[in-house]
Amino acid sequence: MNRKIIIAGAGTGSVFQLTPEVKNLIDDADIIFSDKRFNALIPEYKRVIDIKNYSELEIFTGKILILVSGDPGIFSLMSVIKKRYPDEDIEVLPGISSLQVICSKAKETWNDAAILSGHGRSLSVGKFLNMIERNRITVLFCDKNISPSWACKNSRIIDDIDIFIGSCLGSDNEIIFSGKPEDFSNREFPEPSIILIRNNSVYKPERLNLRDKDFIRENDIVMTNEAVRSVILSRLEINNDCIIWDIGAGSGSISVSIANQFPYSEIHATECNPKAADLISRNASKFHLHNINIHNARTLEIIDTLPKPSRIFIGGTNGELSGILERISLMNNAVRLVIACVTLETFTEAYEIMRNWENFEAVQISAVLSKPLNTELTLMKANNPVMILSAEK
């Protein structure tokens, strides 16, 4: 007998929110993989296997139903099943998601909602806050650790937001809460829970590619100019899933530019000058950025405490370059490194190590910028050339 795998959404678990199509399928299936909380939807005579043991489905034949919570199309087991059984004949039936339910309770549309899950997934505070800042509606699927109270505690720093929390949706114990983050910061909520956050004053950056004139400046703190900065960002090849180290961050123009273009990335900026570290913090605040972690210390003192990066930029090292490159060489994870060198000595030291790495490239940038000489004339003023090395380990 052939095997037919059907992934169906059980909704919130309420029989009233179970679609007739899925109800008929439950009656018709030979084997059902399901979470225990959906037992009330399944006749007692049916053979039910805990959904955690979904890998056992390959030993069965017939019509196999995998009953997932909510809708299969959002944070469900469907992607795992499809990847594990690419050659199987899989059918998918929709269900009512708790996302739809909480939006209906809040009387909100969800076509423009940013959707996050902390259910069995890692979620940084920076990514969460940047999502809230830049979206009118943010919905978070919660678990024991990334809970509604966690969301409320962290979101208190953002002005003018409203909170809607749904716990045990669709059950007899359903509870809906609404208010401000401070109302629920120290409160416990039964699982499963979901939270909707409405931002009444969404921040939209004026531009993603920041210009030099956009930054708060200090005369005694050097800033990488925008022409060189654009090449550095291009060479780093960043995406929103990256963890980036900005070593010797200086004014923070690289960290802030990355954070602004990739608000869901995670940046760790090391800078031993307290005044420069404060400048990074002020620029991050100016652009409503929460994904920059500033470490006011020498890099080698804290390098073992930083999370493993996928990208590293080195702008300054205070004499620690060889030690930092040695530590990077010993990392057991893949990493892309970019170094900006303004002296021949730094270039030589970095080149001797990086030239043996994969995809090594070097480029020299000589930026010449216009500067008014007087009311009638404009002068072209050259900046010092910068050599940019990039490679992968």
Image (spheres, helix red, strand yellow):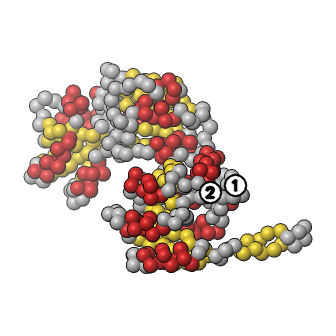
Residue drawn 45% across and 62% down?
A: 311
Q: Tell me which amino acid carries mark 2.
A: Ser
Badge 2 crowding class, 10 Å Cα cut-off, few under 14, some 14 to 19, many 20 or more, is: many
- Specify whether residue 383 is in view: yes
The answer to whether the residues at label 2 and label 1 have Cβ atoms under 8 Å apart is yes
Task: Give the percent coordinates (x, y) of residue 347.
Answer: 53, 76
Residue drawn 46% across and 25% down?
A: 184
Rendered-image quadrant of the C terminus: bottom left
- Specify whether residue 263 is in view: no
Q: Secondary structure at mark 1?
A: loop
Taking the image as shown, residue 227 lies to the left or right of residue 293, namely right
- Which of the two labelled residues, at mark 2 and mark 1, occupies the earlier sequence position? 1
Q: Secondary structure at mark 2?
A: loop
Numbered tag placed on residue 251 in the rendering: 2
On the image, numbered disc 1 is attached to which residue? 217
Q: Quadrant of residue 169?
A: top left
